[in-house]
Amino acid sequence: MKLFAYWRSVYEAWIDYPKREGAVIAGQYRILRFLGIGSYGLTYVCVDADSGREVVLKQAKPSKRAAGRQALRREADVLTRLRHPSIPQWLASFEYNNGAYMATELVRGQTVEDFIFERGVVFSELETLRFVRRLVDIVAYVHEQGFVHSDIRIPNVILNDDRIHLIDFGLACRIGEPALRKTAFDSSAAAPNKSAEPADDLYAIGHFMLFMLYSGFEPRSSEAVRDASWENELTLSPATRRMLRKLLRIDSPYSNTRQFARDVDLSLNG
């Protein structure tokens, strides 16, 4: 069994190997660079020969076979129904050489992950609340259109000049549909067919806030790191502490995204 698993991993790594820089897909998209590989797809930055502009091209992961194609179709279905300046625009879906592809708008800028871990930016509590308040408006729009993002993390939020963008809808689906996989920060022992709900995104936003709030944290000792929780380590206002406890389902959670937005507004304007 172990040998089979090993050879399967070797095979999957081989068929999922990224296409080379300069390769042309469907006679139209010339690959400039490989962006990365996820659970269900490979992503490239390409030049679209028709428009001359750079776009993101996502390829369904070959090793996932039908599941990869289904995930790409579902992502395209979500994006074609969203019209928001902070969400990448769907451009095209097509088949080429037995592979499934989708082109979307390229969002430039730096991710929150880049700001924290590469540039060493420290976010204060006030800056975190202001940033998340703007992000929540984008997430609320997604929910109001009937969808859940399901993967709100610091690599999937980009800041370009003064605009925040929410990217990578690879795990997004309609509210109530079975989640493509367990959401990144879901601590519940949910069944594999757990339905996707807006509460999943709110839970993820709680962890998103913690990453920002911890950006300037310096532990006192290794012993403290092992024993302390965020409630003991971070110096936060009572209002922010209450919001985090609700987002992280320690206390009775928020019933919807706008309810959380109102609490943030009260905290910022109080």
Image (spheres, rainbow, N blue to C red):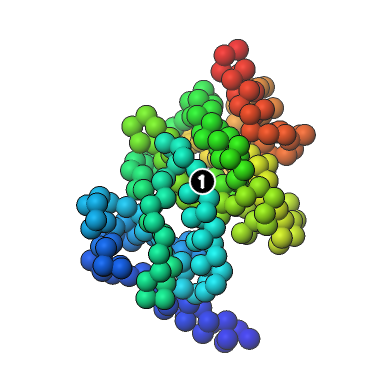
In this view, the residue in front, 208 or 162, is 162
Percent coordinates x, y for residue 223 in the rendering: 62, 44
The residue at the far top in this view is 270
Query: Which three-letter amino acid code belongs to the residue tagged 1?
Result: Arg
Residue at the image position 37 percent from the left and 29 percent from the top: 162
Percent coordinates x, y for residue 3 in the rendering: 57, 87
Look at the image and tell me whether residue 225 can be seen. Answer: no
Residue 252 as seen in the image, left or right of residue 147: right
Residue at the image position 75 percent from the left and 60 percent from the top: 191
Percent coordinates x, y for residue 39 in the rendering: 52, 63
> Relative to 264, is 39 above or below?
below
In this view, the residue in front, 115 or 267, is 267
Give the image quarter of residue 136. Answer: top right
Residue 229 as seen in the image, left or right of residue 19: right
Look at the image and tell me whether residue 6 can be seen. Answer: yes
Circle 1 packing at 10 Å, graded few (<14), some (14-19), many (20+), is some
Residue at the image position 33 percent from the left and 32 percent from the top: 161
Quarter of the figure that contains the C terminus: top right
Residue at the image position 61 percent from the left and 27 percent from the top: 261
Q: Which residue is mark 1?
A: 81
Give the image quarter of residue 21. Answer: bottom left
